[in-house]
Amino acid sequence: MRKLSRLRRRKITAPVLLFLALIIVGNAYAFIGATVTTPGATASNARSTMVDEGREIFLRGCSSCHGLNAEGGGIAPALIGVGAASVDFQVGTGRMPLADMSQQAMRKTPIYNEEETAALAAYVATLAPGPAIPGAAQLTFERDGNTAEGGELFRTNCAMCHNAAGQGGALTQGKYAPTLMGVEAKYFYEAMITGPQSMPVFGDKAITPEEKLSIIKWIKAVESEKGLGGASLGKVGPVTEGLVSWVLGIGLLIGIAVWLTTKSR
Amino acid sequence: MRAARERVAGSVANFVDERTGAAKFLKKSLNKVFPDHWSFMLGEIALYSFIILLLSGTFLTFWFVPSQEELIYNGSYVPLKGVKMSAAYASTLDISFDVRGGMLMRQIHHWAALLFLAAMVAHMMRVFFTGAFRKPREMNWIFGVALITLGIVEGFLGYSLPDDLLSGTGIRIAQAILQAIPLVGTYAAFFAFGGEFPGLDFIPRIYTVHVLLLPGIMLGLITVHLMLVWYQKHTQYPGPGRTEKNVVGYPLLPVYMAKAGGFLFIVFGVTAFLGAVASINPIWVFGPYTPTQISAGSQPDWYMGWLDGLVRMSPPLESHIFNHTISWNILIPGLIVPGIMFTGLALWPFIESWATGDKREHNLLDRPRNAPSRTAVGAMAITFTIVALINGGNDIIATHFSLTINQIMWATRISIFVLPPLAYVITKRICLALQRADRDLVLHGRETGRLVMLPHGEFVEIHEELSPEEAWTRTSHEQLAPIPAAGIDANGVRAKGVLKDRIRARISKGILQEQIAKPTAKDKLEIGDGHH
């Protein structure tokens, strides 16, 4: 006991205890939080049809904002006519359900698995006709795309928000165009035909399906392009270049100048 | 054998000397003494990067085609194969991907440009904060300001030449700034571009300016800059044995030849290293320029970034007078503010000597703390520029730190007015605190942390006296008194120009009144042997 009370008076004790308490609380919260926010985890497979299952998930996970009949509400849009592609994009990339009410839904680990997402999409598609999920037969960008043409289309239509290298960019009031690196081809196609969040819809008359494939092919080419000219410095242009020239360049040279003018002892 | 070689060397030297009289000049020059301090080598970094720029730039001219003639790219960079672009952009792609060593040389050239500007700024800060610009060196200060200004323009033209999407965006903004000049703006823009933007003339024109006109002027200015340093001799930090009339240091040969020569290769090495490992201005990522396209996150190089930041934060002000539009939103941040800043910078030596009334020659440098107001003004200018620079990168900062552009813009809009005066006050307080610390150190010596109990029970800490050299360094500076205002004389007659004098007296009081009196021998005697 004496030993413990002596430990209690050490300077280090308070911060260590605080740190431990934070870890315990944080982990407990994460554990409880995780069990609360996975409503689909126990979904029964005994449902008769996919649409019924989708409706079930919808009522449980989406209807509190989007309405019991997907008619929308004060904080969420109606989902009648958005089509399966929109659901597949929003739910498949983890944007929906929303993590919080910030400016924009962000990409995160999806909450529903593939079957659940497909079921949700199937249910929403029955509400009214809308864009369908592009199948593998449609996503033949490797074969039918033209990289250079895709680059031209990208720079004309996409670069002003997503950056010339697809690195993403800032929009007003905290909204942003996300980075396009590491995104599945299917989601590019869906985003173009459904126009999620701040993004406009690029219909088949504005950008033909073949041109869409070209754009995807160009993005994939940029993504796989590595280390031309050395470290890419985050591909954000002159901001990091300036930082490197001051910190690494001038910093290093000043260090050497100090060394050169040190008197030898 | 050896004797023969020496005879040959001797006769060659003799031949040259008899015709040029070089021996006398060389003997004098090679024995010239330079003071030794790391901060005196910042200008050298700038000089060496300029040499690297000339050499690598020459290499690039062998392949660069300064033309906006349109062609279809057929080089080795696949994602752009078959795309229509200007010859300038295509040739820059060729330099990057098809010319042996071209990519490395391009990157060395661009890194050297960033280092050149950064070294010039660092060098200028050293000269400013130590008061090295004072008489007799005001002219050289102005040459320096001219070099930085030309360097910024030269850098801008340089990264505009490849005619990629990013540089075209920069040129478009430059054109907007040109157009914002009242009355003559549109004419000036049409003159510069040979018609509507972008036209076909601009790249060839700025090429001539970038590779011939500006480097020529800069080379001339650098030569004069160095000749003046040579003639006026280098300044030195105060210290024992150093006076206004001597220079304490090492001779050019062999010490400085070795140091400077070595440093030249080190700067070469660092630049080549950066060029080899870190990508800079990857023009193939941006694509060719067309006025209909733009990329999110478009940024200028850092030395233009603060100007871009000022333009980004300016509110949309515009007036229409007699059917003529004046775009204050571009005119103020793009021309007026930088105009005031660079003019103030160039005239600073004169402003300072006017305000302090100090018109004497100075070869000994100030320790920045001993000129608190000047140091504070410098800190104010740096703060202003950094706040502007931060807003220049607001979109990149927004995406990478989960902030909103609007937050950053408003934060910098307010900070640009609030932080510089705050920096002035804080810096001045720090300087005065350091003066006080110097005074304490000289009077009481260094605290050793050793406590001693005297026979009668009193505890004292042993203070260790400074060496005479250290004490001298901390007390050798002079402290100027404020200029008294000329006013009404004994007969009640107002002196001429009394308002001007009163303003000057007021400023001089603001600058010079608040100082910590440096310790005198009398102070020292009164305190006795330290502990109390």
Image (tube, coloured by chain):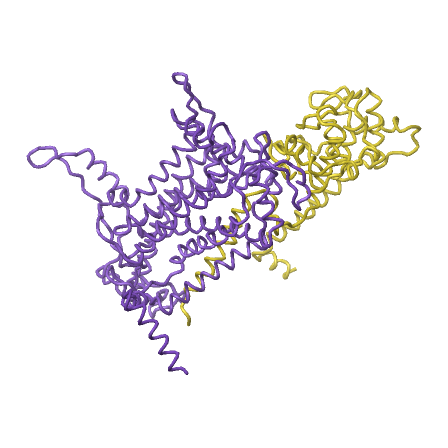
Chain colours: A yellow, B purple
**Residue A99, quarter of picture:** top right
Q: Residue at x 28, y 68 (%)?
A: B18
Residue B242 appears at what percent x and percent y? Answer: 27, 63
**Which quadrant would the N terminus of chain B be assigned to in this image?**
bottom left
A42, above or below A230, in the image: above
> Which of these two is toward me, B324 or A167?
B324
Q: Position of residue B86 (x, y in %)?
A: 58, 37
B51 displayed left or right of A117: left
Q: Position of residue A210 (x, y in %)?
A: 76, 31
Q: Which of A170 and B207 is in front in this view?
A: B207
Quadrant of the image containing the C terminus of chain B: bottom left
Can residue A261 be seen here? The reply is yes
- In the rendered image, the residue lying farthest to the top is B322
Q: Which residue is drawn at 14% across and 36% down?
A: B487
- Taking B163 as reference, is B27 left or right? left
For this view, does A12 lie left or right of residue A209?
A: left
The image quadrant of residue A171 is: top right
| Displayed quadrant of residue B476 | bottom left
* Residue positioned 47% across, 25% down in the render: B316
Is residue A65 in view? no
Q: Residue B221 appears at what percent x and percent y?
A: 35, 49
Residues A202 and B155: in front is: B155
All told, the count of numbered labels is 0
> Furthest residue to the left?
B491
Q: Residue at x 49, y 48 (%)?
A: B114
Does residue B238 lie above or below B512 as drawn? below
